Image (cartoon, rainbow, N blue to C red):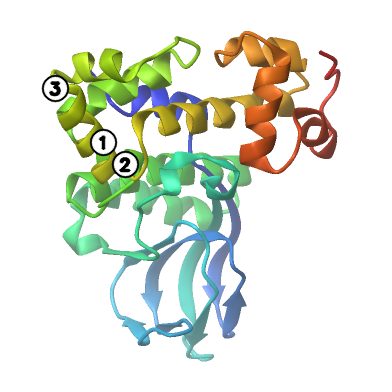
Amino acid sequence: MDPFAALFAHVTPRARTFFAGNLCNSVDFPEVGHLHLFKGGVLTLTQPGAAHLALHEPTLLFFPRGRTHRFVVDPERGADLVCATVELGGAEGNPIGEGLPELVVMPLAGHPTLAPVCDLLMAEGFADGGGRQAALDRLFDYLLILIVRDVVSSGGVESGVLAGLADPRLAKALTAIHDAPAKPWTLEDLADLAGMSRTRFAELFRTRVGRTPIDYLTAWRMTLARQLLAKGKPVKSVAAQVGYDSAAAFSRVFSRMSGLSPRELAGKVGGGEVGS
């Protein structure tokens, strides 16, 4: 069983490359997710409330949820970098960003499995081949999955769905939720899948994931609903696909959790037909 398959099928991390080359001026980065690949040169990372970090070897810097930061460089040597913004959708309900550290620092010498992808990124970033932007974005997408996998396997995630998926018992229940969100899951159903008593399962789930199993099921349904509404799917159809017998019941839950009604969200993102 691949515990990440169903999760990534719906909420795959996305990256968009915006810089590749030699950075010769100091620069500030806004409060959005970033992934930086530092290859060489002179570079110091500064961020509010944290000690400065001087980089001297090829290193990955990953800001999963967004944090303002600044690169200070030697204007004569500069720093060789490939940089991308990343979207984990934490503010919109995507659970991947939950539990990840504010900053992940990964020297490539200590993570040899990442080196081949990083070598491809640098080669593509400093070349001028056709389809360069698309190639870089896809390599960053793949690299994001590798980073998440590495952080989880090394115990770097203490809470959230990724922490739950790292536990083989909870992973069975979480995968069932991800695969079949419309099913009327009960606490007993999920505990049986995990091979645990209801009490022990509920306690472990809340400790690892940070919310109750039923609360997580609801949050996952709303995550999928946002995606369907953004594609212009009718509210009644979305409600059925995420496990609600009526559009009214779905709309009440969606509005409570999102702060917008399904129709308002669909209109905001430019969706098409949203009739009930």
Q: Residue at x 17, y 61 (%)?
A: 110
Image location of residue 117, percent across then percent down: 35, 46
Q: Is residue 88 above or below residue 212?
A: below
Q: Is residue 51 above or below residue 11?
A: below
Nearer-the-camera pick, 165 or 115 = 165
Q: Residue furthest front?
A: 199
Kindly indicate whether the residue at mark 1 contacts the one at mark 2 (C-beta within 8 angstroms). yes
Q: Quadrant of the C terminus?
A: top right
Nearer-the-camera pick, 259 or 72 = 259
How far separated are the C-alphas under marks 2 and 3?
16 Å
Q: Can residue 126 be seen in this snapshot?
A: no
Q: Is residue 41 left or right of residue 23?
A: left
Q: Which mark is residue 209?
A: 2
Kindly indicate whether the residue at mark 3 contacts the one at mark 2 (C-beta within 8 angstroms). no
Which of the 4 quarters of the picture holds residue 246? top right
Q: Which mark is residue 196?
A: 3
Nearer-the-camera pick, 59 or 190 = 190
Mark 3 lies on a secondary structure that is loop
Q: Residue at x 53, y 73 (%)?
A: 22
Kindly indicate whether the residue at mark 3 contacts the one at mark 1 (C-beta within 8 angstroms). no
Q: Residue at x 15, y 31 (%)?
A: 200
Q: Is residue 225 left or right of residue 53?
A: right
Q: Which mark is residue 205?
A: 1
